[in-house]
Image: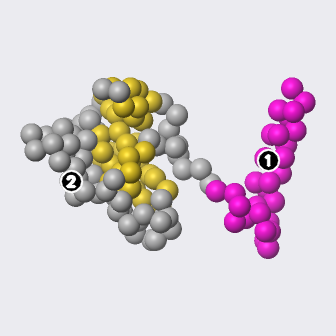
Amino acid sequence: MRRSRTTLFLATLAVLLADAPGCAYKDLIKKRLPPPHRVEGGVLFQYEAPAATVVTLAGNWPGNDWGGTSSPAARYDNTIGRMTDPDGDGIWTIVVDLAPGRYQYKFVKDNNTWVTDPSNPDTATEGGFTNSLLVVK
C-alpha cells in the first residue's frame, strides 16, 4: 500500500511541477486525451499522432463500414472518416453523429496502421480482431 501512495504522490507532484514556469518536466508529461464523448453535433473522437500525415476513424456504423472494407468493394478508403488536425498539434479529431447503440472502432494512421484507442480502455473482439468499444446512450 505504501508503494501505491508514494507512486500517486510522485505522479501528482510531477503534474504540479510541470505547470510551473520554466520547468523542464513540462515536455516530458503528456496530457491524456479524453475517451470519445458527446459534443454538439455528435460524438467527438480524438487521437494523438504528431508524425502522421493522414488519420481516419474506421468503425462498424452505417456510412463508415470499417473505412469501406466491409462494403461490396471491400477496399479501404481514406476519405471515409477522415480526421483533421487544424492547428498542427498532432491531435486529430472528428465528430460523428451516432445514434444510441454499441459501436466498435479503430484509428487508421497513414493508410495502413490500425490501432485501438489508447484513451478508451473498453474493447470488444469480433472476427478475431480486438477493437475499441463505444456505447452511445
Amino acid residing under circle 1: Thr
- Callout 1 environment at 10 Å: few (<14), some (14 to 19), or many (20+)? few
- Which residue is painted at 62% across and 54% down in the image? 31
102, 136: nearer the viewer: 102
Residue 28 in the magenta stretch? The answer is: yes
Residue that carries the numbered disc 2 in the rendered image? 77
- Principal secondary structure, stretch drawn in magenta: helix
Total numbered labels placed on residues in the image: 2
In the picture provided, is 54 more to the left or to the right than 90? left
Q: Which of the image's four quarters has the N terminus?
A: top right
Question: Taking the image as drawn, is residue 127 in sight?
Answer: yes
Residue that carries the numbered disc 1 in the rendered image? 12
In the picture provided, is 73 more to the left or to the right than 36? left
Question: Which mark is first along the chain, 2 or 1?
Answer: 1
Asked if 118 appears above or below 25 in the picture, the reply is above
Extreme-bottom residue of the structure: 22
Asked if 40 appears above or below 19 in the picture, the reply is above
- Which residue is painted at 81% across and 60% down in the image? 17
Q: Quadrant of residue 27?
A: bottom right
Amino acid residing under circle 2: Asp
Q: Position of residue 101 (x, y in %)?
A: 31, 28
Q: Position of residue 14 (x, y in %)?
A: 80, 54
Question: Taking the image as drawn, is residue 136 in sight?
Answer: no
Asked if 109 appears above or below 88 in the picture, the reply is above
Under tag 2, what secondary structure?
loop
Q: Quadrant of residue 62?
A: top left
Q: Which residues are magenta?
A: 1-30
75, 36: nearer the viewer: 75
- Which residue is painted at 38% across and 55% down in the image? 109
Q: Which of the image's four quarters has the C terminus?
A: top left
- Callout 2 environment at 10 Å: few (<14), some (14 to 19), or many (20+)? some
In the picture provided, is 119 more to the left or to the right than 70? right
